[in-house]
Amino acid sequence: MSAPAIRISALTKRYGGVQALARIDLEIGQGEFFGLLGPNGAGKTTLISALAGLIRADSGALAVMGHDVVTDYRNARLKLGVVPQELVFDPFFTVREMLTFQSGYFGIRGNRGWIDEILHRLDLSSKADVNMRTLSGGMKRRVLVAQALVHRPPVIVLDEPTAGVDVELRQSLWQFVEQLNADGHTVVLTTHYLEEAQALCGRIAMMKAGRIVALDTTANLLSSVARKLKVRAGRPAAALALGGAAAGEWAEFAFDDPADIETLLARLREAGADVLEIAVGEPDLEQVFVEVMRRA
């Protein structure tokens, strides 16, 4: 049986009086597109830093493709590519030089073909011989993605990869990453753009205060929140009297089964609410996230 792409066992990390990670247990299978979500300070970046070997956990264990990040760190780091949240770069090199040096850190020679492909797929070919310090913030973020991929790691961690990035780059980046995932790469994404996580991730973990407070498939998480029937009525008070929640000019009614809509509308007609317009609102990940954080 093959090892999971990432295995985290009873991981704990404390900074003084702050419990950054509190006995995290998590397995991510090979080939997954996995979302790691949470508010600022939830522990996501601490978890990623421990996985990448940038910090040492107080207790617990982490492994990438079966390689322990402490006792077998060379192989663990070879299997992992991380796109950091911060824009960290060397101002003395061109884009191509940076990627060539990055290849050398992993003992890879003759990597020009793959570097050229990455540059092309990330729309960086025209900037290949441009000094890093002259690039825009969005271009620098593209280079960080290229750096994480230069050694062809089977596991890719993207920590807020589209923060401050224009819409065109965001779309092209996700097309590239989705293709990598389709080719068998495991992708772990942290993002505050919840619509991205909803569209891309098959499974999601939500963190708060150093703990995982929700872990399930995206479909199951979405189904945990009731759908809403939105009604604009000529007599709003009559609609609200039946238990609807006010939402501007609309009243909202939660329902689980589409068959409930007919019953709700019949009740509204009987109450004389004078229905002018209706709309069905499907739950989204933002609603789920807010509800999970509130309960946690």
Image (tube, helix red, strand yellow):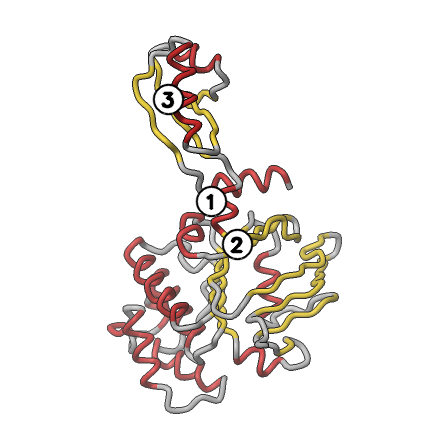
Mark 3, other Cα within 10 Å: few <14 / some 14–19 / many ≥20: many
Identify the residue at horizontal 39%, vertical 34% (top origin).
Answer: 281
Between disc 1 and disc 2, whose residue precedes? 2
Secondary element type, mark 1:
helix
**Amino acid beneath label 2:** Ile
Image height of 45 relative to 74, above or below: above
Q: In the displayed structure, does residue 268 sit left or right of residue 117? A: right
Q: Which residue is mark 2?
A: 204
Q: Position of residue 173 (x, y in %)?
A: 34, 63
Q: Quadrant of the N terminus?
A: bottom right
Between disc 2 and disc 3, whose residue precedes? 2
Q: In the displayed structure, does residue 9 sit left or right of residue 122? A: right
Mark 2, other Cα within 10 Å: few <14 / some 14–19 / many ≥20: many
Real-space CA distance between mark 3 and mark 1, rounded to the nearest whole angstrom? 22 Å
| Residue 2 visible at all | yes
Say which of marks 3 and 1 sits in front.
3
Identify the residue at horizontal 48%, vertical 28% (top origin).
Answer: 254
The numbered disc on residue 231 is 3
**Amino acid beneath label 1:** Leu
| Residue 41 visible at all | no
Identify the residue at horizontal 71%, vertical 52% (top origin).
Answer: 18
Real-space CA distance between mark 1 and mark 2, rounded to the nearest whole angstrom? 10 Å
Q: Quadrant of residue 170?
A: bottom left
